[in-house]
Amino acid sequence: MNQMPGFRTQNGRIFIIIAIAVAAIAGGIVVSSNLMQRTLDLREARLFPQARHVDEFQLETAAGESFTRSDLEGRWTLLFAGFTNCPDICPDTLAVLAQSMRDLDMMRQETLPQVVFLSVDPERDQGEHLAEYVRWFHDDFIGVTGDLEEIDRFTRQLGLVYFHEEADEETGFYNVDHSASILIIDPEGRLYGRFGPAVTSEDVTADVFALTR
């Protein structure tokens, strides 16, 4: 009779220990699974801990068609912001993306991501000029822009920044400082991650393949 309470206490302790162990293992599996889903085996892409919602916006393609949040849904998107008079960062980055798309196509990737070039210089980058610029890199690239107020709203929620410098008094030319990251947007239209500046086409190809397979 005197041993029964101790026996029950010991059994209770064992049960608690087992329950804690099972919970820890289960929790570890969930955490590990989520971590694997968010990091995969990526070379340069940096994924956000949680995909970020993108609010509705209203931009316009170089062809004069509406470009909204729904155009980011249904497939992966790589988005880069810049301007056509950019001397180095923009052409270098678009060349990297173009090579990556060609490589993915050769790998028979079932669905290629869409590449969107957002011009933050709508005064100079519109219509056929913008269309010719993006086509020079790849026929499937999409050039978009809009009024500065709408561009500001869109870039703020993406974490992109840009700044128009003062125009030269003689030539009227001005430069635009801007973020150099390539944004990764998932098929639900959410901001999923980014590539930093100076990424290579090999890195983009490898990471896009890992994300979309």
Image (cartoon, rainbow, N blue to C red):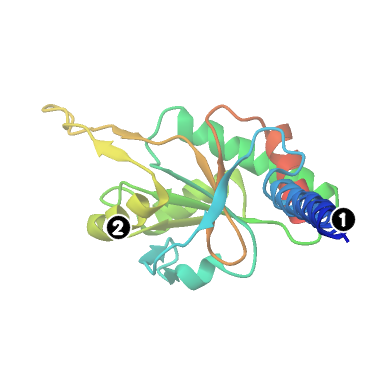
Q: Which residue is denoted by mark 2 in the rendering?
A: 153
Q: Do the residues labelled 1 and 2 touch (CB within 8 Å)?
A: no
In the picture, residue 59 is in which quadrant? bottom left
Question: Looking at the image, is 35 positioned above or below residue 44?
Answer: below
Identify the residue at image location x=23%, y=58%: 149
Residue 148 is left or right of residue 103, and the answer is left
Residue identifier under label 1: 7
Is residue 168 visible to us here? Answer: yes
- 157 and 152: which one is in front? 157
Residue drawn at 77 percent across, 47 percent down: 210
In the rendered image, residue 167, in percent from the top left (x then y), is placed at: 17, 32
Name the residue located 32 percent from the left edge and 60 percent from the top edge.
146
Label located before the other in sequence (1 or 2): 1
For marks 1 and 2, give the CA distance.
67 Å
Q: Which of these two is toward me, 199 or 100?
A: 199
Find residue 110 and report its image quarter.
bottom right
Quadrant of the snapshot with the C terminus: bottom right
- Please state which amino acid type lies under the numbered disc 2: Arg
**In front here: 55 or 70?**
55
**SS at mark 2?**
helix
Q: Looking at the image, how many numbered discs can be counted on the residues?
A: 2
Does residue 143 appear left or right of residue 94 in this picture?
left
Kind of residue at disc 1: Phe
- Check the picture and name the quadrant holding the N terminus: bottom right
Disc 2 packing (10 Å; few <14; some 14–19; many ≥20): some
Residue 10 location (% of width, % of height): 83, 51
